[in-house]
Image: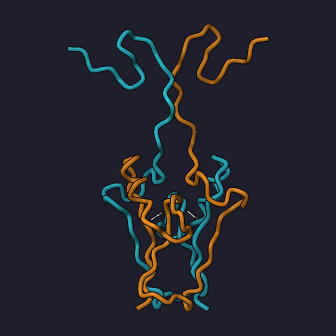
Chain colours: A orange, B cyan
Amino acid sequence: ALAPPSPQQGRRGRVSIVAPRAETVNPSIRKEEAKVVDTVQVAELTKPLTAYCRCWRSGTFPLCDGSHVKHNKATGDNVGPLLLKNK
Amino acid sequence: ALAPPSPQQGRRGRVSIVAPRAETVNPSIRKEEAKVVDTVQVAELTKPLTAYCRCWRSGTFPLCDGSHVKHNKATGDNVGPLLLKNK
Ligand code: FES
Ligand code: FES
């Protein structure tokens, strides 16, 4: 039997371009969790400045490791971290 | 003169399905800025708990207004805020 038409394939074999689906922000971080929430005890911050990731591409999430730069270049996006200042 | 072919349109008018482009995380917040970075002076936090947005859908960005819930439902994503605890 033939497979059912894919979303991009009409009944007569004509191809239509479909709008992209709504996209996830987080491709890979802690996908086993229903919602990724992190808590910072601000009294425990030791450095004068700590950067927290908001691009969901950091290898040290929830901290920022600079990966937003590559993401912004690749996509034209403009995201950056939240900086916590301790002084 | 004809416009140059769009990425989805080949030279002979054949249509090919292209993989979705890498997607931006931030659809609309402060797009006039090259990089959206926010700074929190932790000594100035007045409430015991403050939630900062990491989904880029908040109407009160950089604060979280709960919009991540709608985003997660619509896309199957699992993003949530960064919580700053002041006690
Ligand atoms: S690595 Fe994600 S904001 Fe910097
Ligand atoms: S509204 Fe964006 S994380 Fe809550």
Q: Along the line of sight, which residue is nearer the eye, B19 or A8?
A: B19
Q: Position of residue B80 (x, y in %)?
A: 62, 64
Q: Residue furthest front?
A: A59
Q: Where is residue B8 in the image (x, y as percent from the top left)?
A: 42, 23
A11 sits to left or right of B26: right
Q: Kindly identify the residue that appears in the image at 40 percent across and 92 percent down.
A: A87
Q: Along the line of sight, which residue is nearer the eye, B54 or B18?
A: B18
Which quadrant would residue A21 be assigned to in this image? top right
Q: Where is residue B45 in the image (x, y as percent from the top left)?
A: 50, 87
A37 sits to left or right of B20: right
Q: Kindly identify the residue that appears in the image at 54 percent across and 68 percent down.
A: A60
Q: Which quadrant: the N terminus of chain B? A: top left
A33 sits to left or right of B54: right
Q: Kindly identify the residue that appears in the image at 51 percent across and 58 percent down.
A: A57
Q: In this view, does A59 lie above or below B22?
A: below
Q: Which residue lies furthest to the left in this view?
A: B1
Count of marks placed on residues: 0
Q: Which quadrant: the C terminus of chain B? A: bottom right
Q: In this view, does A15 lie above or below A31?
A: above
Which quadrant would residue B6 be assigned to in this image? top left
